[in-house]
Amino acid sequence: MMKKKKILNIKTGIISTMITGFVIGIMILSNSISPEIIVEETYIRSWHTVFEGALADGMEASPDGGILQIFFINHTETPTTTYSNNSSQKYQDWCNTSGLGYASADDFRTEIDHSTLFDVLLRVNGNKTMCWNGTAFIGSYLRVNFTSPHLGIAALTGMIGVESQNNTGLEYLWMNFYLNNSGAGYSIIRGNESKLPTIRYQAYY
């Protein structure tokens, strides 16, 4: 009888140890296959104002994502193709030939021929913070609103943008924004003065 009891106790201990080990194993396996909770941060783009104020205060000489030049340039019937050119020198030459003007520094004043049709052309660029989608520059991520009551341009009227240089290998996207009075062009009367009080340059990032 004593021998049987010892054997029974041994068997009972083995079974108990096996059950304990099985439970621990299940717990470890359960923890190892539990799904991970991953929280991803979603960034939502919105319009940010790069500059807003008097146009003269927004002119920049260095191309670091800002307003570069403004041209009172001879009116064209084909603005989309004409203003896709990326040469500031060419636009300056056109202005000089037509008796019109341009500026590339702040606090400017320029004289232009009266009774001569012209468009308002604004050159800007945007860096990869302002108009980059991760792989390419996006022209629609930049916009300019402009006003000049003396020219009959209502407050903060949206200018029409034309990409003039979009190269993913460069640091900037260059764009030209224009207003042409719905295709009719602008002009000033002899002796009159036109002011450019407000411009808003925005980027979508």
Image (cartoon, rainbow, N blue to C red):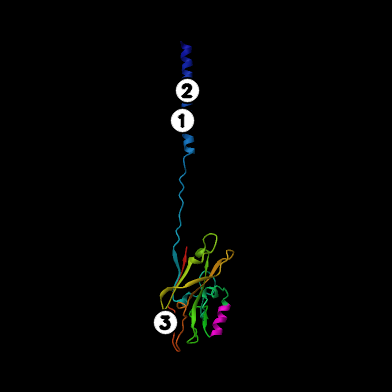
Q: Position of residue 166 (x, y in %)?
A: 56, 67
Q: Give the magenta range.
A: 89-98
Quarter occupied by residue 44? bottom left
The residue under the point 47% across, 31% down is 24
**Sequence-wise first label, 2 or 3:** 2
Figure check: 171 above or below 181: above
Residue 196, by quadrant, is bottom left
Mark in the foreground, 3 or 1: 3
Magenta highlight: main SS: helix
Residue projecting furthest to the right = 169
Decide whether residue 200 is among the magenta residues: no
Are there few (<14), some (14-19), or many (20+) residues within 10 Å of tag 3?
A: some
Amino acid found under the numbered disc labelled 3: His
Going from N to C along the chain, the mark reached first, 3 or 1, is: 1
Secondary structure, mark 1, is: helix
Residue corresponding to mark 1 = 23
The reply to whether callout 1 and callout 2 are in contact (CB within 8 Å) is no
Residue 150: image tag: 3
Q: Residues within 10 Å of mark 1 (few under 14, many from 20)?
A: few
Q: CA distance from mark 3 to mark 1?
A: 85 Å
Dot 2 falls on a residue whose secondary structure is helix
The residue under the point 48% across, 72% down is 160
Q: Nearer the viewer, mark 2 or mark 3?
A: 3
Mark 3, secondary structure of its residue = helix
Cα separation, mark 2 vs mark 3, equals 98 Å
Q: Can you identify the residue that label 2 sits on?
A: 15
Residue 64, image x, y percentages: 53, 69
Type of amino acid under label 2: Ile
